[in-house]
Image (spheres, rainbow, N blue to C red):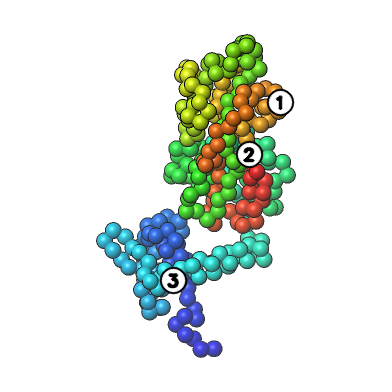
Amino acid sequence: MVNTPLSNLPLDWVRAFEAAGRTGSFTAAAAETGLTQAAISQRIGNLEARLGATLFIRQPRGVILSVEGEAWLPYVTHALGTLRQSSEELFGIQRRRVTVWASASVLQLWIAPRLAGLSLGDQVELSFKTMVLASEDGPGVSGVRIRYGNGDWDIAHRARLYDEALTPVAAPILIKRAGQGGWQDLPRLGLSGPRAGWHDWAKVTGDAPTPVPQLRFDTFTAALSAAESGAGVLLASLPLVRAHLEGQRLTRLSQSVLPSENSYWIVASDRDVTRRQWEALTGQFCA
């Protein structure tokens, strides 16, 4: 067999190029692969020398793909993806431990009730860890994550858990206290975080944004417990309180809903989960 310069390209060189091209940075590629920036640069340099082509244009503030690099990148990404998927399917390669990071409210109200029957493979441990939304991309957070937003993230795997919709709910005991008056005069509960609030509700429905909440919480689970106790009306996520409504622990106060383009998404990189494990997770958790 004729040994051409392209017949034996080291896979590590190709992986370094793909990671740097996809992330747009040698530094980001180093963080993703667990290598140093110098190692990424060396491997890409070796690859360029072997190919006889410049794949990146080095600039004072970073690198950009050359015309040749930009043309080659999608082929390399597809080839590596096919190689990874086929190895998983044919040889049973799998992560022995999968960690899922999520807020306490999503873990308790959405994830936990859907765990029965979930299997990621023989001898695979599924670990759950609680995080606050503000730290979801912080140091030490690696693995499958539940993020809140519109899904516009540059990440290999992402799927929406459910369509977000907000509406006022309250405990039956609080509604009785209102008598013949409307619920709009009842005390309200405030919730800090990314979801829309009472002012957003007022803009859509025409209801007054008052009374101003005297109780405010930084977690949905705490606010939900307060609403169940009769402490006030909560502008709640319908998917997260469905069991409370069906069990008549809470009552829906309006047929109007406040839709949102944002919701909770499950996201992961290729190194965090195999394709089969990803399909099992999304099949179980996504509505």
Tag 3 near tag 2, CB within 8 Å: no
Dividing the picture into quadrants, the one containing residue 78 is bottom right
Residue 35 in view (yes/no): no
User: Disc 3 versus disc 2: distance between alpha carbons?
Assistant: 41 Å
Looking at numbered disc 3 in the image, what kind of residue is underneath it? Ala
- What's the residue at 50%, 81% (across, down)? 7
- Whichever of labels 3 and 1 marks the residue nearer the N terminus, that label is 3
Q: Nearer the viewer, residue 206 or 82?
A: 206
Horizontal side of residue 241 vs 36, given as left or right? right
Disc number for residue 20: none
Q: Relative to 241, is 171 above or below? A: above
- Whichever of labels 2 and 1 marks the residue nearer the N terminus, that label is 2
Q: Which residue is mark 1?
A: 247
Q: Relative to 155, is 166 above or below? A: above
In the displayed image of the protein, which residue is found farthest to the front?
206
Question: In the structure shown, which secondary structural element does the residue marked by tag 2 occupy?
Answer: helix
Residue 287 in view (yes/no): yes
In the displayed image of the protein, which residue is found farthest to the right?
117
Q: In front of the other: label 3 or label 2?
A: 3
Question: In the structure shown, which secondary structural element does the residue marked by tag 3 occupy?
Answer: helix
Q: Which residue is mark 3?
A: 71
- What's the residue at 66%, 27% (across, down)? 244
Residue 104: percent from the left, percent from the top? 56, 33
Q: In front of the other: label 2 or label 1?
A: 1
Q: Relative to 94, is 287 above or below? A: above
Q: Which residue is mark 2?
A: 111
User: Disc 3 versus disc 1: distance between alpha carbons?
Assistant: 57 Å
User: Disc 2 versus disc 1: distance between alpha carbons?
Assistant: 19 Å
Tag 3 near tag 1, CB within 8 Å: no
